[in-house]
Amino acid sequence: MADETCSERSLKEIREAAARKSSGIYLAVVGMIEPLVLGYFLTQINVERLFGRSASAGYWLQGIAVLIVIVLVWHEFAMSSLCVVWVLDVFDFLFPLLLAIGQYVLIATLAAGKLQYWYFALAGIALMCMLSLVFQALKIKGRGNDAEPEKCLCDCMPRLTVSIVPVCAGLSAAFGAVLLTVSATPSLEVLLLSITTAGLATFGGFRFCAWKTFLSPATSCKRAPKSGSY
């Protein structure tokens, strides 16, 4: 009986130690992946289309949008790692890898000048982000009373910033479909890219402010609305 109790206590201590170290491991994985994505982006930028005779507003907007996506994904994973207190499994590593592949496709379509497929890649990234958030919510729910810190995060994060993610996926897919079915003009491409870049920048601003508010000492989880969701 004593050996059994000792064994259970040891297993509990191992699980707790693994959960405490998960944050650093998660951050290390993201810290390896996103710099590679950024490096690939910088090598694929066409300087002639930025500053040369073939420079265009559409290419500038598309490049800025890609950079915003990279920063957003990097920032979200880095900030989420601060709140990871569960033992990591294969899905925790799968989503960063899938998002890295999505960003690779996004950059490749930028370099190839295929704007319609660029939008489909952007829709895929938004969809993977949404699935990642759902997965995290399910993990938090499955941990029950042990997930009090993460539940506080869910309560304090405004629902609006998360609800925008599926909207971004739908709009990106719709823009890609439009460019596939109609003969795109430079003015139409600039219009769609202006909407996309402004939307990404606005969403990024909301998320940065949401994380800053959540980590502020003045923020109280008890004052957060019950309808809030991470």
Image (cartoon, rainbow, N blue to C red):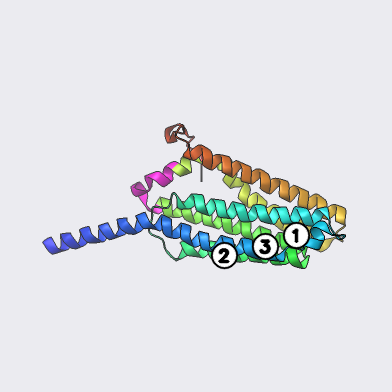
Indicate the quadrant where residue 5 lies.
Answer: bottom left
Q: Which amino acid does label 3 sit on?
A: Phe
Magenta residues, start to end: 142-152
Q: Locate residue 13, reporting x and y percent.
A: 26, 57
Q: Which residue is drawn at 71% across and 53% down?
A: 64
Q: Which residue is drawn at 57% across and 65% down?
A: 98
- The answer to whether residue 106 shows anywhere in this view is no
| Left or right: where 154 falls relative to 195 | left
Q: What residue type is labelled 1?
A: Gly
Q: Are marks 3 and 2 in contact (CB under 8 Å)?
A: no
Q: Count neighbours of disc 3 (C-alpha within 10 A) and say few if under 14, some if 14 to 19, many if 20 or more.
A: many
- In front here: 174 or 56? 56
Q: Which amino acid does label 2 sit on?
A: Leu
Q: Count neighbours of disc 2 (C-alpha within 10 A) and say few if under 14, some if 14 to 19, many if 20 or more.
A: some
Q: Locate residue 112, reporting x and y percent.
A: 76, 68
Indicate the quadrant where residue 175 lies.
Answer: bottom right
- State the residue position of label 1: 176
- State the residue position of label 3: 41
- The answer to whether residue 55 shows anywhere in this view is yes
Indicate the quadrant where residue 149 lies.
Answer: top left
Residue 218 belongs to the span the image colors magenta: no
Mark 3: secondary structure: helix
- In front here: 123 or 217? 217
- State the residue position of label 2: 98
Q: Locate residue 72, reporting x and y percent.
A: 60, 51
